[in-house]
Amino acid sequence: MYSNKKNVLQLVALLQTFGVRHIVLSSGARNVPLAHTFAAHPFFICHSVVDERSAAFYALGIIDSTGESVAICCTSGTAVLNYASAVAEAFYRQLPLVVITADRPESLLGQMDNQVIPQRGVFGALVRKFVQLPEISTPDDEWYCNRLINEALLEKDHHGKGPVHINLPLSEPLFEYSETELPTVRKINRHIEASSCAKRLPTFAKRMIIAGQLPPNNGLKETLETMAEKYGCVVLTEHPSNLHSPWFVWNFDALLGALTCEEQSQYAPDLLISVGGHVVSKRVKQFLRAHPPKEHWLVNVTGDVADLYRHLTDVIETGALNFLETLVRSDTGLATPYSPFSSLWKHQSDAIPVPQPDYSDLAAVKALMEALPDGCALHLANSSSVRFAQFFPLKATIHTFSNRGTSGIDGCLSTAAGYAAASHRLTFLLTGDLAFFYDMNGLWNRQITGNLRILLNNNGGGEIFCTLPHFDHSCPTAQYTMARHSTTAQAWAEATGFTYLRANNEEELQRRIPILTGTASDKPILLEVFTQMEENMTWLD
């Protein structure tokens, strides 16, 4: 029988999956759930060494003898500190030592309780990776725990070898053993090259590639078109990915929103490949978490684990173009002249109409997107702006940018101003009022150039907060969340040298947009569009 502590079970099961056989155990009470589970399982070879300092060096001897990773496991408190000398030795000798330390709940830290010291990150720079496991009480906790253990065990032999530290808080009772089997756990694999994945690709009938944020001229378009046209892959893109093609599905957020929960299952992939950076659509994240693919391959040059859709199986440590070209070159029975899965997505995508909104923020976005000139740059502020832009197609010649690394509203205006100052392109910023006024000092510099154009949707507050689940925008506290205001940008824009335009209705909007997007003016231009928040909220659902 094994411990009923779920974080213990996840750790022991993953150590088995990663092939870590030798466990050096030191005596204590807090690590009894670990020691009991290791000893009860026939896969593990357990060694008993009471003194933790000796135990850790004993483990280094096993590594020297076998060439395998070895785990050491101790109780909480000063026992942990006794590992330090051997951990340092393992770090500088590049030996794959897995340090497992039992801990007491963090709530006891500093409360004069027994055997409680700060164990979080106690070895500092002497380990290649430190993780603090949660005590598991929800499915989210279990996913997080699994991911952290995978990250640690992947790092023990990544670009060289070295020690990793896994700390487990364990609450009492400690001595309950009710589990008869270890759980089935997810192991994340890391590949340095793409050939092994290429061999598996033909085994998946429903293939999907999703491209996150990428720089302009990223070089992926032709290869992705081949994957879509020849191999039946569904390729999902957003404007910040800077990928535009008739073969790609750019309006997938609206597409998924039009489906029932039952219909969504038909659109779920067997294989998901993700390239690029952050993805804007919250809906596609929810979709892929609710309908998990059999495998999810993440392609990035660092080999880091980023489990956005919570079903990651493989990390391919290479560039996206190199990986995709490897898939195309392999061509081992992969070609699919007709893919029902791809046809399903394309048919539904083509059937989604472009919105024709009445006068609103969305109408202003539509007017701008349709009037943008070829070859310009478009900066999308966070919150509503970047989401509204995705409702409309964008010319392939337009370079698109957005601060989606952390998705904050701070700095959207300053980033666009800096881009315009260093570029000859006509540069447009689509922004909302909170993002604009938060960063209004972005206009307070002497380098503002005449190629900067700003469309400011001013609806008197942060309407996107109205979409929060169970948020009552009519309650008294909503004013603090939504930050309702009656501010206008006119005086500040004119003081900083902008030509200021305003629109209060559809007719004025249509008259002002050609001025904003034209090339006649050598001064920066700001168009402030005033709308009513209540009329905008339905499009943010």
Image (cartoon, rainbow, N blue to C red):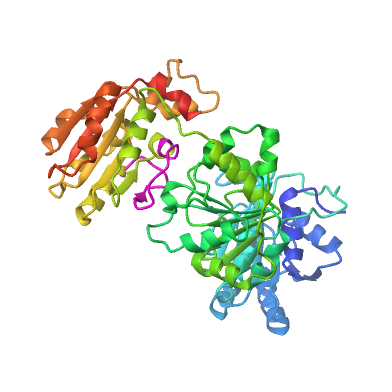
- Residue 61 location in percent, x, y? 69, 81
- The residue lying furthest to the front in this view is 337
Is residue 78 among the parts visible in the rendering?
no
What residue is rendered at 63% in x and 47% in y?
A: 343
Please tell me which residue lies in front, 195 or 104.
Answer: 195
- Residue 358 location in percent, x, y? 39, 22
How many dots with numbers? 0
Task: Indicate whether residue 255 is drawn in magenta.
Answer: no
Q: Is residue 225 above or below residue 263?
A: below
Please tell me which residue lies in front, 361 or 122.
Answer: 361
- Residue 296 location in percent, x, y? 64, 56
Please tell me which residue lies in front, 288 or 258.
Answer: 258
Please tell me which residue lies in front, 401 or 491.
Answer: 401
Bounds of the magenta span? Answer: 388-411
Q: Is residue 404 left or right of residue 187?
A: left
Residue 268, picture quadrant: top right
Q: Main secondary structure of the magenta part?
A: loop
Task: Indicate whether residue 393 is drawn in magenta.
Answer: yes
